[in-house]
């Protein structure tokens, strides 16, 4: 009888994941050996056809500028590029296809595992197209109309050099894929909103890109600098100030570096704490600059968590400067801290209101979601988040009841089918209608339940937290003069009272697995101070639709939203 049974496994056989070699950051970033820094990345398995084309992603390599179409072979676990030279990685278009597919698949998987369910795109259809050589420009963007993320390239000045492909930059692929995922989760965030809302799309896409790059150990090792002969580095190398000013900054400054159009690189300012009065400074009305406030807060939290994890690893306790730490272990802790923080932030997305986003909502949502999965804050992560957001002047909203269990009047369920509350929009509407007074939801405005989704998260004890999450949106249309009357507040200076305005409100209802409400996170449609702030911002930033109305979807194609963000950016005179 043989001792072992050998399985002759086909390279395309079903499995839990495939391992792909991907460029870890950007081809300009090299390792100790001077070669392009790459990482072995595990990507969840799905049956993959030529294209490559899997269940949710489809690489369409059509180059409009060159009028060329290529179908690349399916991806298999035996990675053809495992030992490929730098020259091959830089020039082989089939590798470009692997880089975009693998990176986007990994990004989608990160969101799905944090939120505990499959995520839909905001357009009809199951495939997001990834177009690695879409146009001859140093730009990349998500387009709702095309159901695609489009990547440009720039031919090199020297004919012998390969073109600069934006599709080879890990961080750019993650950033653009995050826009597509976020649009699927909160499609109303592309409506004309408060200044924080447009800033959130950019800031969060940068945060996910940075933390994803940073959750790869080779990147962190490289950023920590060369170790001594024994592979160790000193306490000085990992001092919190150095982690921030040197290590993280060197990674962050590469993000978006190859883009000359559109978003451009993250600037140094993103690594600095914003001035105390940033919210009222005109330059912070610009979405990219405003989004950097969130990036700076999250980077501070990352350094805090990482430093705490390093403390037990030093060769000598106390503050001895001569203490050393193994570079690979230090990098491992940094990568783990980044992955943990990223999961924590993504989990919060389900608890955001569906409209009228403000930065404080993110803090609130992340904390609420974290309590559900990790009831004790033994490691102090929630405390760190609260402190770092507070330093940037962002505190949890207080003017709303969000915890239904602490509410004075409990919701009632007479005639409500609990099981249907987990999947049926009409049942959720009935529940909302029945409890409108208890939940402080005005019924005079147009109200629609837009989504009802199940969610399962795994806590650190390995047990599953099951919930369902529903969102509803309220809308009101009136003239600016009517808004002035109803709010009893003055209109912004210079606003024509006859201007038609559209106002939004809405909320997120989180139910226990058995259909009992536990949280109601909402932005009231009749919060007139907020409505006037929004109208003032939209008026000042010139966001009117073709009929000169304020607050309406601006009538231009939806996919133009990101192009417009870039336009505002250009007109603000920033050097991007
Ligand atoms: Zn962007």
Image (spheres, grey):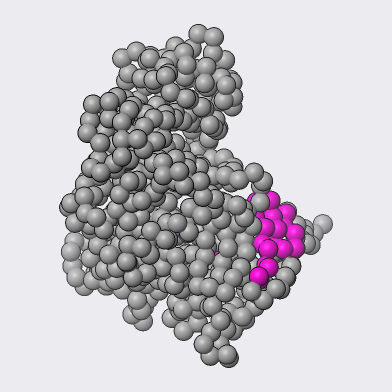
Counting from the top left corner in percent of width and height, residue 532 is at 29, 36
Q: Judge whether 407 appears above or below 519 on screen.
A: above
Q: Is residue 65 visible?
A: yes
Residue 68 is covered by the magenta coloring: no
- Front-most of residues 550 and 36: 550
- Front-most of residues 480 and 314: 480
- Front-most of residues 504 and 386: 504
Residue appearing at x 57%, y 40% in the figure: 117
Residue appearing at x 22%, y 33% in the figure: 490
Q: Is residue 374 visible?
A: no
Q: Judge whether 503 appears above or below 315 on screen.
A: above
Task: Classify the position of the N terminus by image quarter.
Answer: bottom right
Left or right, residue 130 beside residue 47: left
Counting from the top left corner in percent of width and height, residue 350 is at 46, 38
* Range covered by the magenta-colored residues: 40-64
Task: Classify the position of the C terminus by image quarter.
Answer: bottom left
Left or right, residue 452 beside residue 204: right
Counting from the top left corner in percent of width and height, residue 495 is at 29, 41
- Residue at the far right in the pictured view: 1
Give residue 129's quadrant in the image.
Answer: bottom right
Counting from the top left corner in percent of width and height, residue 475 is at 44, 30
Count of numbered badges drawn on the protein? 0
- Residue at the far top in the pictured view: 414
Residue appearing at x 30%, y 49% in the figure: 540
Residue appearing at x 23%, y 71% in the figure: 236
Q: Judge whether 163 appears above or below 346 on screen.
A: below
């Amino acid at each position: 009888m043989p001792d072992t049974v050998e399985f002759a496994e086909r390279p395309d056989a079903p499995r839990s994941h495939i391992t792909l070699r991907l460029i870890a950051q950007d081809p300009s970033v090299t390792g100790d050996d001077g070669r392009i820094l790459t990482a072995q990345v595990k990507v969840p398995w799905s049956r993959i056809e030529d294209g490559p084309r899997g269940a949710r992603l489809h690489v369409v390599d059509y180059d409009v500028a060159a009028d060329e179409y290529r179908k690349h072979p399916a991806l298999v676990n035996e990675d053809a590029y495992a030992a490929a030279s730098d020259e091959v990685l830089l020039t082989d278009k089939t590798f470009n296809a692997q880089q975009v597919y693998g990176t986007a698949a990994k990004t989608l998987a990160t969101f799905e595992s944090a939120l505990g369910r499959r995520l839909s795109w905001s357009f009809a259809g199951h495939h997001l197209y990834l177009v690695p050589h879409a146009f001859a420009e140093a730009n990349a963007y998500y387009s709702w109309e095309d159901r695609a993320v489009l990547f440009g390239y720039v031919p090199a000045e020297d004919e012998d050099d390969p073109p600069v492909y934006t599709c080879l930059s890990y961080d750019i692929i993650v950033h653009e894929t995050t826009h597509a995922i976020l649009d699927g989760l909160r499609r109303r965030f592309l409506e004309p909103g408060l200044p924080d809302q447009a800033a959130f799309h950019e800031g969060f896409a940068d945060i996910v890109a940075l933390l994803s790059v940073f959750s790869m150990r080779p990147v962190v090792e490289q950023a920590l600098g060369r170790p001594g002969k024994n592979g160790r580095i000193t306490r000085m190398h990992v001092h919190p100030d150095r982690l921030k000013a040197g290590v993280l900054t060197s990674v962050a400054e590469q993000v978006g570096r190859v883009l000359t159009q559109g978003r451009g690189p993250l600037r140094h300012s993103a690594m600095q704490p914003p001035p105390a009065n940033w919210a009222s400074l005109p330059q912070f009305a610009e979405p990219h600059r405003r989004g950097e406030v969130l990036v700076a807060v999250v980077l501070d939290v990352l350094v805090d968590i990482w430093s705490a994890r390093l403390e037990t690893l030093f060769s000598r306790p106390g503050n001895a400067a001569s203490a050393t730490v193994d570079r690979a272990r230090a990098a491992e802790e940094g990568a783990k801290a980044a992955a943990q923080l990223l999961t924590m932030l993504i989990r919060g997305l389900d608890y955001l209101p569906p409209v009228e986003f403000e930065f404080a909502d993110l803090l609130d949502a992340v904390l609420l979601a974290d309590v559900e999965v990790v009831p004790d804050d033994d490691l102090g992560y929630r405390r760190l988040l609260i402190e770092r957001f507070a330093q940037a002047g962002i505190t949890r909203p207080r003017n709303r009841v969000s915890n239904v269990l602490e509410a004075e009047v409990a919701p009632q369920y007479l005639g409500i089918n609990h099981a249907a509350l987990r999947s049926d929009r009409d049942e959720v509407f009935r529940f909302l209608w029945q409890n409108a007074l208890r939940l402080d939801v005005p019924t005079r405005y147009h109200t629609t339940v837009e989504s009802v989704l199940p969610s399962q998260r795994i806590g650190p004890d390995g047990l599953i937290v099951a919930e369902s999450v529903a969102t509803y949106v309220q809308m009101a249309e009136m003239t600016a003069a009517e808004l002035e009357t109803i709010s009893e507040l003055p209109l912004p200076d210079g606003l024509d009272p006859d201007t038609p305005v559209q106002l939004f409100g809405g909320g997120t209802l989180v139910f226990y697995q058995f259909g009992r409400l536990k949280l109601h996170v909402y932005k009231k449609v009749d919060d007139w101070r907020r409505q006037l702030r929004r109208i003032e911002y939209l008026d000042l930033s010139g966001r009117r639709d073709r009929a000169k109305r304020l607050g309406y979807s601006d009538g231009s194609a939806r996919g133009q939203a990101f192009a417009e963000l870039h336009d505002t950016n250009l007109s603000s005179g920033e050097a991007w």
